[in-house]
Image: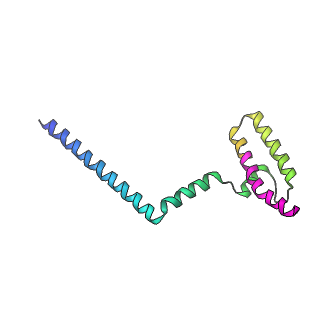
Amino acid sequence: MAARILANLIVMGSGIMIRAFAQAYRQALANASKTGAAQEAVETIKRGSKMMTEAEARQILGVTENTPWEEIVKRYDKLFERNTQSGSFYLQSKVVRAKECLESVEKPKQQQNSS
């Protein structure tokens, strides 16, 4: 008899806790959407995870701001090949992202110079 009562109390208590948690979660989402905090957090996560700074890209490829694009491409090819042989996919992907980052910086500079 006591075990049955105890089991009922546990079931009812957990149901109450689940409903309270769900209500608090909905309220937190509503508050975040009112202030725009949720959207800002999502944008920050997207930017932070995909973006590499120009300084980081230059450091990975071992080039300076004055290095010509042809030299950057040579460094990229050399590092990419070296990491293909040693099998480090992580480093290879960092080299690719570094080249992509510098491409987005250097291409507009080249277009300005040629105009």
Residue 111 lies in quadrant: bottom right
Residue visible at 20% across and 38% down in the picture: 7
Residue 47 lies in quadrant: bottom right
Residue visible at 76% across and 38% down in the picture: 83
Quadrant where the image shows the C terminus: bottom right
* Residue 34 vertical placement versus 84 (above, below): below
Magenta extent: 96-115
Residue 102 magenta-drawn? yes
Residue 71 at what x, y percent from top left?
87, 50
Residue 67 magenta-drawn? no
Residue 100 at what x, y percent from top left?
74, 50
In-image side of 6 versus 97 (left or right): left
Residue 30 at what x, y percent from top left?
40, 60
* Residue 9 vertical placement versus 86 (above, below): below
Quadrant where the image shows the N terminus: top left
Residue 52 at what x, y percent from top left?
68, 54
In-image side of 37 versus 70 (left or right): left
Q: Which coloring applies here?
A: rainbow
Can residue 48 be seen from the camera position used here?
yes
Most common SS among magenta residues: helix
Can residue 58 be seen from the camera position used here?
no
Residue placed most toward the observer, 38 or 14: 38
- Toward the bottom, the furthest residue is 35
